[in-house]
Image (spheres, rainbow, N blue to C red):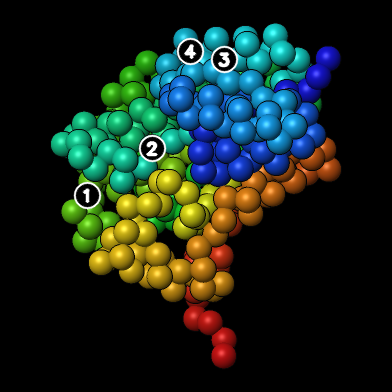
Amino acid sequence: MKNISVISGGASGMGKASARRLAADGPVLLCDINESLLEQVRKEFEDEGLEAYIKVADITSPEQLAELAEYAQSLGTVKNVVHAAAKDFNTVEPMPEPEASEEIVNNVIFGTINMVDAFLPVLENGSFITFSSLAADSATITDDDYDLWDEVYEDDFEERVKEAVNNLEPLFGMPQHAYHAYCYAKAFCRHFVAANAARFAEKGCHIVAVSPGSFDTPLLAPQKAAQDGHGAENLASVTAMQRIGQPEEMAELVYDLCQPLMFYITGFNITMDGGTYAVTHVAQLD
C-alpha cells in the first residue's frame, strides 16, 4: 500500500507548501474548510504531476475528522500527519468578545486535540507535526494552567479552559483579547505535544510542534497591510535576517521532520522565526 501524508489547512500558506513538499515522495490528502480552494490546489498539484486527494473537514468536529482519518486509511498507510489548520487573532477580529476568544480556543486547542484523537489510532511508525507559533512565547502561563492542561480529557476541561482564557490579563497593553487567547492556545499546543510523546512512541511514532514567526502567508496579510502599509517592513525589522519567512522554508523543516532519522526528536517544539526571539530577548553582539 502507498504511504499517505495528511495535511490539515492544506489549501493555503504553510500547509499548502508542506503538502507540496511531501507530495514529492508520495500521495497527499489535503483537508480544509474551503472546498473551492481545495479544488484549486488539487488541480494545481496534479498539473505538477503530484498525486493529491482532498476532503472538506472542520477540525473543530471530531466526527468530521474521524471521517477524514477513515478516508485516509482507504487511500493507503497513513505515514505523516501535518496539522497546519488554525485561526489566528486577525481572522476572528470582527467578532465580539467572548465569542472571538472562544473561536480561537475551539479552533486551536480543541482542533489540535481532535486531530491527535483522530489520527493517533491510525498512525504506525510515522510523524505527527502540529503548528504552534512564536506567539506562544508571549503567553503568561501559570502552574494552574499547566495543571489544567494535564486534565485535557476530563469532562469539565472545555468549561475550565474557556474560563481561564476569559480571565487572561492583557499582553503588551494590546486591547484585543483574542490575541491573548491565541498566545495561550498556541502555548497549550506545545504542552499537549510534550504530553503525547510517550503514547506516540508506543506506536513507533513521534510528535513535534513547529512554531513559525512571521511568514508570508494569507494569515499575515492584515499585519502586512497595517501601519500605513509599513507592516511588512516593521515585521522584518525585528528579525535577525531582516526579512519575512517564506512558506517553502517551513515546508522544508516539516519535510525533514517526517524523515525516519528525525524520530528521536519528539515531544518538543522547534521555532523557525528568522531570529526574532533571539534579537528581542538577548542583547546582540557587534
- For disc 3, the marked residue is 68
Tell whether label 3 touches label 4 (CB within 8 Å): yes
Q: Position of residue 274 (x, y in %)?
A: 56, 65
Left or right, 69 with reference to 190: right
Q: Amino acid at mark 4?
A: Gln
Q: Amino acid at mark 3?
A: Leu
Q: Position of residue 285 (x, y in %)?
A: 57, 86
Q: Position of residue 117 (x, y in %)?
A: 55, 19
Residue at x 23%, y 46% (from the top left corner)? 177
Query: In which quadrant will I find the N terminus?
Result: top right
| Residue 87 badge | 2
- For disc 4, the marked residue is 64
Q: Amino acid at mark 1?
A: Gln
Disc nearer the start of the sequence (1/2): 2
Disc nearer the start of the sequence (1/4): 4
Disc nearer the start of the sequence (4/2): 4
| Residue 220 badge | none
- For disc 1, the marked residue is 176
Seen from the viewer's position, the closer of residues 217 and 169 is: 217
Q: Mark 4: few, some, or many residues within 10 Å (few <14, many ≥20)?
A: some
| Distance CA(mark 3)–CA(mark 2) | 20 Å
